[in-house]
Image: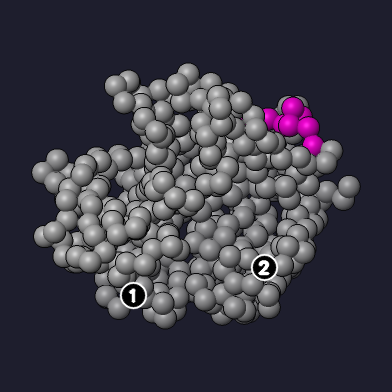
Amino acid sequence: MAFQWAVATGQAEESLLYLRSVGDRFLLFRHDPGATWDDLLHDDADRIGFFQVGDEVQVYRPARHESGWRIEHWRATVSEARRAHWTLLTAYPMPASSASSVDALPDGRVRYVREGGRVCLLVERKGQAPCEVAFAEPVYEIRPALSQSRRPSSAFGYRFILDSLTIPPVCHELDPSSGRTRVVLASRVRGFDPSRYVTRNLRVRSADGTEVPVSLAYRGPLEPRRRPVLIEAYGALGLPAPVGFRAANLSLLDRGVVLAVAHVRGGGDLAEEWHRAGRGRGKEKSIEDVIAVAEQLRSSGIAAPGRVAARGGSSGGFLIAAAAGRRPELFQTLVLDLPVLDLLSFLERDARGAALQEWGDPAVAADYRWLRELCPTANLAPRNHPAMLIHAAWHDRRVPWWCAARYVARLRAVKTDGNPVLLLTSWNGGHAGPSRRSDRIREDALQCAFLLHRFGISE
């Protein structure tokens, strides 16, 4: 679960406190460049976030209560950091959603709650029932605007950003008293008309009967012909699959490609239970979800035979490669961006607490056996494989370049087909992507060109 708390300090800036669950613990991090208090206080159960206003320090800490976890708001002083001298001001119940953030209002708060695969914006004012802000789009993302954009105006008070697979970012301003919104600023994309595109949701039944949400985007009506389809998935670390706007995808949509974002288990799309279902040994279910989505898109008549591609980055690259390793006949093309492919070596080299809790510990014999069954590199076999474009980064400290290089070397040695396997290693940038905008555009163009070439689309 990820939780963000923005607190108005009365100063020129605001403090953002980030809460993330690791196992059964909640870790609270701060982002406040102006803080001068001692480093984060912590004990065996939690970490503490704070911000300072003069001699007074406002402290936020997660704590276990008889009714469950909650966030406690304490007051302390710079001269006395011992907890015995803190004063408890209030406590907030822990959100039950998989990802939530809260922004302060003069007489209440605005909450972002992810429920049922979508993000709800709730306005909670003192003495009033929570009011949900409705959106017409079936697929969208919303997030708080930057702090300098949220300053109250005369009639409206709170600003947020909305975008989707087919809508560029739009800044809205919300009147908390009435729930009305107005557009403040809309991003412009030359020659782009959102009315030409369609977004919708569907449900796919996985191998164990669980329904997996899928977000679709395409141009014009699907009928009467089947389309090439690009499946995207992530399914790890409790992070929801992104359904925001990406300009590079327009090149695909405009040429008839259907974009399908699979919200598989392991992500944070459907509460924390959805994440836990795809963590550790549950990674098997995440792989089954991707396979089920590919099968359903073919059987439903949306995908043209032999024209299903899949794309994933980082942990999503592992997921796509593992699914294609089990059912290579389902996928024509794979695009893997900074992927975790040599899973065993990755965990042995970078055995951090979060990685071990998400995947498992290869140093434990029982974990090693099933991790090896999942590892894409360890399970490569002499047979036909999809065409692949794999991207690694020389300066990627999170997923080293050799994760992709080892996979490519072994794949080229065992595969029995003539499909291309391309390895692109970037010298500029790390796991977050190239540091130069021109390099990022060049990589996006290469991915689109590779996919269109494999789909047989030349115009």
Magenta region: 192-199
Which mark identifies residue 86?
A: none
Q: Is residue 428 above or below residue 212?
A: below
Give the percent coordinates (x, y) of residue 378.
48, 74
What residue is rendered at 69% in x and 65% in y?
389
What separation in Å lies between label 2 and label 1 (alpha carbons)? Answer: 31 Å
Amino acid type of disc 1?
Pro
Indicate the secondary structure of the residue bearing disc 1: loop
Residue that label 1 marks: 362
* Viewer can see residue 346: yes
Q: Nearer the viewer, mark 2 or mark 1?
A: 2
Residue that label 2 marks: 434
Determine crowd level at label 2: few under 14, some 14-19, many 20+ residues with C-alpha closer than 10 A: some
Question: Which callout, 2 or 1, points at the residue further toward the start of the chain?
Answer: 1
What residue is rendered at 75% in x and 44% in y?
250
What residue is rendered at 29% in x and 21% in y?
127
